[in-house]
Amino acid sequence: MQPNPLPSSGWRATSPPSATPMQQYWLLRPGALTAGLRKIGDVQLRVSREYAQGLPESEAWMLARAPREAIWVREIIMRIDGTDAVFARSFTPLHASHGRWQRMRRLRTRPLADMLYNNPEITRSSFSVARLRWQMPLYFAAEHILGADCPRANRILARCSTFWRAGEPLLVAEGFLPGFWPLAARSLRAQGLSLRNV
């Protein structure tokens, strides 16, 4: 079970009050995000970087671990029909990346969903959500991935949850870029659907 977000972290247990119904749906949508994105259009995944670092203090609550513990990080971006749509920062204790979560190191351009679902040993916490702030590690990931094209932090809505396997956590944080929302709305219109029946 993921602990409640620290007030200083910028994450919260409920959607931001300013989030639209469409945004609330995607921020709290259960199941594999990649599967949902593929219903919108052609999804291409690119790995930006994978590396070891000390667990930032602002993210320590996510793993229920002490700050500066060694972690393994994977940062990716997904494009839908050629548009930058969603980026993600995932991490687990470094020792777990050689143990319970070692498949994380071998995914290459496959999504994490390929190893997280359909395994009864794996459980998932509830979501925490945020409108990003410039000092959050997830925003640093966006800046590294997008460079000069990175939007301002407060234009990015994000969610995170922790997957647990045999007591070892794997945090997945996903940011929805501004270009994602028109694609999601277009997809609903094309299918003749509303948020009540997606």
Image: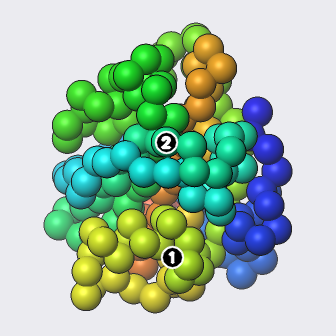
Q: Which mark is residue 156?
A: 1
The image position of residue 45, as x and y in percent, is: 23, 50
Whether residue 183 is situated above or below residue 3 in the rendered picture: below
Residue 9 visible to the viewer: yes
80 versus 1 height, above or below: below
**Mark 2: which amino acid?**
Ala
Q: Mark 2–mark 1 contact, CB under 8 Å? A: no
Where is 193 relative to 9, above or below?
above
- Foreground pick, 92 / 20: 92
Instruction: Tell me where residue 69 appears, x and y as whole percent.
Output: 57, 43
Nearest to the observer: residue 95 or residue 32: 95
Residue at (56% x, 64% y) in the render = 158
Q: Residues within 10 Å of mark 2 (few under 14, many from 20)?
A: some
On residue 107, the disc is: none
Q: Is residue 36 visible?
A: no
* x 65%, y 68%: residue: 130
> Residue 148 appears in which quarter of the rendering?
bottom left
Q: Rounded to the nearest whole Å, what is the CA distance between mark 2 and mark 1? A: 27 Å
From the viewer's perspective, tell me whether residue 147 is left or right of residue 73.
left
The residue tagged 2 is: 70
Looking at the image, residue 100 sits to the left or right of residue 144; the answer is right
Q: Residue at x 57, y 51 (%)?
A: 68
The residue shown at (79%, 44%) is 3
Is label 2 in a helix, a strand or a loop?
A: strand
| Quadrant of the drawing holding the N terminus | top right
Q: Position of residue 197 (x, y in %)?
A: 60, 49
Colour mode of the rendering = rainbow
